[in-house]
Image (cartoon, helix red, strand yellow):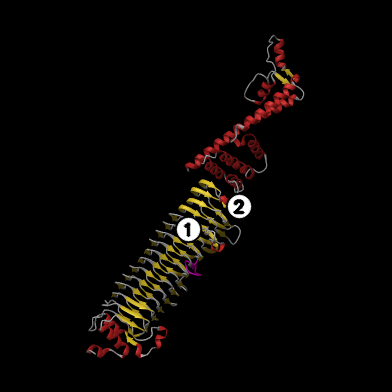
Amino acid sequence: MDVWSAGRLQGRAEKALWDRVREKSLEWANIGAPDPTSGSCWGPERTIRASIIKEIALGEAPVDPCIIRIRGARITEELNLEAARAVCPLDFEGCYFDHEINLEQLEAPAIYMQKCNIPGGIRADQLHTHHNFYLNGSSIGAPLLLRSAKIDGQLAMKNAKLGPGAPLRAGSITISQGAYFQAIKVEDKVHLAGARITAKFDMRGATLTKSQDGRALHAPRIQVSGNVLLSNDFRAEGTVDFTNATVTGDVRCSGGTFVKPAFGETRERCLDLARARIQQHVYLNNGFNATGTVHLADATIEGTLDCEGGRFENPSDTAIYAPGIQVGRDVRLTKALTPAATDESGFSVRGEVVLGGACINARLDCRGGHFLTDGAGQRSITARAMTVGSLKFGCGFLAQGTVDLRRTTVTGELVDITSIETQNIKMTRLTYKTLRESKESGESGPKKLIAWLKKVDYSPQIFRQLSSAYAAEGEEGWAKKALVAGRDARRMKTLGYGPRRGAEFLLKLLVGYGYSPFRVLYYLIGLEFFGGIWFSIREHAMEVSPLYQRTQSQGTPWHPDFNPWIYTGDLLLPVVDLQQSKYWIPTHSEEWISVALTISGWALATALVAGLGSVFRSDARKDSELIK
């Protein structure tokens, strides 16, 4: 034994460490069984003073260590390496630390403290490791501070446990090769505000509970150059805050459970991705459970937002709040549409889904989704002024509350909208390119759609929009029927009982509200045949007008011969003079027939003018709406 060790080393444990270091051995200094749960009871035979470790690690001992590796020891005194530079990696396994560990501003090749018991916590603000910092399996009983630290390798805390009063505070930390927190258990807050993580951020199976301020994972402005994994039985009791985050990969929360806090500023939010930018996909599917609001306001997701099979619960409030969200591909609020799919695996939300002003480039797929409420008058989906590529309902879709699609623009197809109860939908100024019913509906698509629209709260625009969609597809017949249905709905729902309603009914009967103007010809031809035949039989009841009888006696003998067919036409055409009705007058019952034919002619002419005028005004309004 050299002079330095002879004067400093105490006990078997310290001598075993010195032997390994002096030999430049990579083997462990095995002091005892690596089970630190009872480390406070270990005696001198398993004790190593922190001052000895410090002198060796900082190169103050007469040795050039390649690594310090200690297993199953009790470290007494405070391990204080603040503002120092370690000459070798530090590797502890199954050790017990009597005091807080101070690694602030330490620069070290790497640090490993795995399966250790550290009741005093770790202060490591501005720590810089050139490789990894591992705390896998360790139990920490006081705050773990890594603020502004720089980890050039991995930060790993798999299966670690941070007890009550032991938050992880790592704001503005920089991690170069990924953060691995699988199955970590934290009974306080994890603070990663402004962190920068290259590669993945993995918290699969983690459990975060008992936060003091309601935030379980506080990571606003975090930057992750990889995937964020909060899945595989991940559980957070408190808000998971990723506001203004930037993630170049996916955010995967499949199978995760997120529970809103009972107090604090974010007490209604269980997952907050407001204003976050996700360059791939967001998965809130396959067993995802949220109790509280999932906040996605103004977020940008360049891939797909997949909620297939997710459960969202926030009764009497908002379950998904995503106004202004921008999604590059699909939004799936649906159940798996496979033969093996069951209701238990389907998408379900109890509370309001807000998508006002959202922009979804591809599909908003709600097929098979269940949108539930806890009372009458509540809203299921609010999507005012949303822009979406296509919008799909049906396949068991259920909305117990209001579905608000006012001012929504569907640039492609709108499918199975009739699966929404008519009393629950608001669709004024909803526009779309095509509207269709899937094969599952079992009815003629256009016929079913028009009948369904007549039951919806009346707005002329919704019928004009349907007509435009059919016209664009070359279905002129259905386009006209949609417009007529709109006038029917207006007559039944807005005019009440009175003369105007009767006039509208006559307008429909005579000229189809102006959309079937040639129907007048059928009535005219029918009346012409009736009048022509009647007056042919009753020609003896026709007399020359007394006025023309006097002119005849005064030497003007001419008057046209009576022609029953021309006479009937003269009665039916109000503005045409066929030189019959003014020369010939009926007597007896023929007088009433003549009056009836005259009134019928005026009625048909008035209906024709009124109907055509109404159509022209409707076309003008449609053009105005398109301009707007």
| Disc 1 to disc 2: CB gap under 8 Å | no
Front-lying residue, 558 or 470: 470
Q: Secondary structure at mark 1?
A: loop
514 w.r.t. 534: above or below: below
> Residue 26, percent across and down?
29, 80
Residue type beneath disc 2 = Gln
Where does label 1 land, which residue? 322
Where does label 2 land, which residue? 423
Q: Residue furthest right?
A: 588
User: Magenta segment: does it hold 260?
Assistant: yes
How many numbered circles does the render carry?
A: 2
Front-lying residue, 122 or 134: 134
> Residue 98, percent across and down?
37, 84
> Residue 2, percent across and down?
22, 89
Residue type beneath disc 1 = Ala
> Residue 42, percent across and down?
38, 88
Q: Residue furthest front?
A: 339
Front-lying residue, 280 or 441: 441
Residue 237 appearing in the image: no
Q: Which residue is found at the position 64% from the left and 25% from the top?
A: 574
Q: Secondary structure at mark 2?
A: helix
- How many other residues sit within 10 Å of disc 1, few (<14), some (14-19) or many (≥20)? many
User: Magenta segment: does it hold 133?
Assistant: no
Q: 559 left or right of 425?
A: right
Q: If the image is split into quadrants, where does the N terminus sit?
A: bottom left
Instruction: First in sequence, mark 1 or 2: give its number.
Output: 1
Figure quadrant of residue 155 = bottom left
Front-lying residue, 482 or 324: 482
Magenta region, residue range? 257-267
Measure the alpha-carbon separation of dots 1 and 2. Answer: 25 Å
390 w.r.t. 266: above or below: above
